[in-house]
Image (cartoon, grey):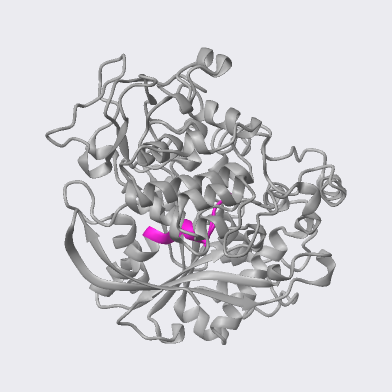
């Protein structure tokens, strides 16, 4: 079992002494035979368990246990910072809570051997050059045709997995109802709402097995506790064109039976992927970039030269790192023509002033070291269009190919005395200290170190189509407790610049987090600019202690 003990350090000085213990827990809970042939390792459910080192060893003796469902394309490792910060905040309040970050079944398909080596060159060699790591050779990224069993991994299996895991780890419904807070990030809020309304024994007359009676309360991280995608879809009406690019999720207007037939036969893709930008290879690339940024953040990146010029990687990097449409179409210059530090590469992929898609944006600082200009691709740098899809921040890009080494100014150095304050053509700063909340080092560590990784490379299509077609899903005797969504107290967090920013759910009385992006509710640093404490963790710990 993987175990990690960490004492938090910020800016080189010890700020808080509470130590958080992390471990991987894996249980054998087999899939039903009806899903068909699948890898044996997928008969296990796993989660990252975070707890105070000074607290009880048994979860049953903790004051509270927070159980978190990830969002679309997310794995358990995405919760690393918020989990640690929340556990520590509770300990400082005299309470011992645990935070369990769940991994869904589909994460079993990933091969993280190269990342787990801890060496960037070995990781590149493993995934792209046929080199062995730990006696293994990479078998390639899977195709939809190789994952037939994912056609059966939808709402019913996902909520059943959470129920079975809780029942195995915390035997006794009364104990769960006293101790457990259920919640999640992004799509995880919807999955929590569905879980709350589910009847797990098929008998509506008995309520002890109902999902809401497995929880004492709910928490929503830039989402809402709901059985609908309405809040995540925003004003566009569907996930395509709001949270995800057009074509990522198959159209469901053909009806539930037709969608299921398409998934079973392989006519429809069994996991969410596009030919470029969003697919297993590019999700894995984020982890490689995180590994390089963790190991040598200030060193000049060698990834541009080391990675092969595959169609996917070329189109993806052009999409992520083109100044305008002319550069994208001509391919000159590409990211390979720039001198970038490892941290700057990761920032280009994930920072809110650079990354084109809102759901992978975090506020980790800004480029430095050379001339920075407006980034007008794939949309105008002032993000005209859907803020739920592209985010709200001004987009920027380095402008001197084969020039200076572009470095990364961490979130807590934005606005410092030596900050040159890069400005777009419109004149105002690209960013300010109040807009930066996440630490580049922590983001890199979460991407590279976690034994259950940050991303979910093979997100099951059926899971999101089931939710989109929830009125049509044949779930007689299952989704029958609508009162469950409001049966327990809840706390809702909304990123001030995130995907809910243009349609804040006022009826949820949310905690608004100024300057936060969609991922920042998970990745924000424990100590914020100005010295204040990170409010997601502080408020969530307080809610857990008082609920």
In the shown orientation, is residue 423 left or right of residue 485?
left
What's the magenta region?
69-81
Residue drawn where x is 54% and y is 65% of the image: 102
- How many dots with numbers? 0
Decide: is 516 above or below 538: above
* Residue at the left extreme of this rendering: 417
Using the image as rendered, state which of residue 295 and residue 270 is in the foreground.
295
Percent of width and height locating residue 143: 75, 47
In the shown orientation, is residue 425 left or right of residue 362?
left
Using the image as rendered, state which of residue 52 and residue 304 is in the foreground.
304
- Asked whether 76 falls inside the magenta stretch, the response is yes
**Which quarter of the image is occupied by the C terminus?**
bottom left
Decide: is 362 above or below 330: below
Residue drawn where x is 51% and y is 79% of the image: 177
Residue drawn where x is 41% and y is 60% of the image: 80
Using the image as rendered, state which of residue 93 and residue 327 is in the foreground.
327
Decide: is 6 above or below 423: below
Decide: is 125 above or below 32: above
Residue drawn where x is 79% and y is 59% of the image: 149
Using the image as rendered, state which of residue 189 and residue 344 is in the foreground.
344
- Asked whether 70 falls inside the magenta stretch, the response is yes
Percent of width and height locating residue 42: 69, 67
Percent of width and height locating residue 390: 49, 31
Percent of width and height locating residue 66: 45, 70
In the shown orientation, is residue 408 left or right of residue 505?
left
């Amino acid at each position: 079992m993987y175990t990690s003990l960490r004492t938090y350090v910020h800016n080189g000085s010890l700020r808080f002494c509470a130590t958080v213990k992390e471990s991987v827990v894996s249980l054998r809970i087999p899939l039903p035979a009806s899903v068909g042939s699948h890898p044996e390792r997928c008969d296990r459910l796993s989660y990252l368990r975070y707890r105070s080192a000074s607290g009880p060893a048994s979860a049953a003796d903790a004051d509270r246990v927070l159980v978190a469902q990830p969002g679309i394309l997310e794995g358990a490792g995405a919760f690393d910072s918020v989990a640690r910060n929340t556990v520590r905040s509770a300990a400082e309040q005299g309470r011992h809570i645990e935070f369990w970050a769940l991994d869904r079944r589909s994460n079993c398909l990933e091969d993280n051997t190269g990342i787990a080596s801890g060496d960037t060159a070995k990781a590149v060699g493993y995934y792209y050059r046929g080199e062995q790591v730990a006696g293994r050779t990479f078998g390639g990224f899977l195709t939809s045709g190789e994952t037939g069993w994912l056609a059966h991994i939808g709402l019913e299996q996902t909520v059943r997995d959470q129920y079975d895991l809780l029942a195995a780890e915390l035997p006794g419904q009364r104990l769960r109802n006293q101790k457990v807070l259920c919640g999640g990030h992004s799509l995880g809020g919807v999955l929590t709402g569905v879980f709350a309304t589910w009847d797990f024994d098929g008998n509506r007359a008995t309520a002890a097995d109902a999902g809401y009676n497995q929880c004492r309360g709910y928490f929503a991280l830039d989402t809402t506790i709901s059985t609908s995608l309405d809040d995540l879809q925003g004003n566009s009406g569907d996930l395509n064109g709001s949270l995800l690019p057009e074509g990522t999720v198959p159209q469901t207007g053909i009806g539930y039976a037709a969608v299921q037939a398409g998934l079973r036969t392989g006519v429809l893709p069994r996991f969410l992927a596009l030919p470029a930008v969003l697919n297993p290879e590019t999700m894995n690339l984020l982890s490689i970039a995180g590994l390089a940024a963790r190991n040598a953040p200030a060193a000049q990146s060698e990834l541009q030269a080391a990675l092969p010029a595959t169609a996917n990687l070329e189109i993806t990097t052009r999409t992520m790192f083109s100044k305008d449409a002319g550069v994208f179409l001509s391919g000159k210059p590409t990211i390979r023509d720039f001198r970038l530090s490892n941290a700057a590469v990761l920032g280009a992929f994930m920072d809110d002033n650079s990354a084109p898609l809102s759901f992978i944006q975090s506020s980790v600082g800004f480029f430095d070291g050379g001339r920075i200009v407006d980034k007008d691709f794939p949309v105008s740098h002032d993000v005209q269009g859907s803020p739920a899809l592209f985010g709200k921040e001004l987009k920027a890009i380095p402008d001197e190919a084969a020039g200076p080494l572009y470095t990364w100014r961490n979130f807590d150095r934005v606005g410092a005395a030596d900050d040159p304050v890069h400005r777009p053509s419109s004149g105002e700063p690209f960013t300010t200290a109040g807009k930066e909340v996440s630490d580049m080092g922590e983001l890199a560590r979460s991407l590279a170190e976690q034994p259950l990784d940050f991303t979910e490379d093979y997100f099951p299509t059926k899971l999101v189509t089931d939710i989109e077609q929830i009125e049509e899903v044949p779930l007689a005797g299952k989704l029958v407790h609508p009162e469950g969504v409001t049966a327990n107290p809840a706390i809702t967090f909304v990123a001030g610049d995130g995907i809910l920013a243009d349609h804040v759910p006022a009826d949820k009385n949310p905690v608004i987090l100024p300057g936060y992006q969609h991922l920042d509710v998970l990745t924000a640093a424990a100590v914020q600019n100005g010295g204040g404490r990170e409010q997601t963790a502080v408020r969530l710990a307080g809610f857990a202690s008082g609920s």
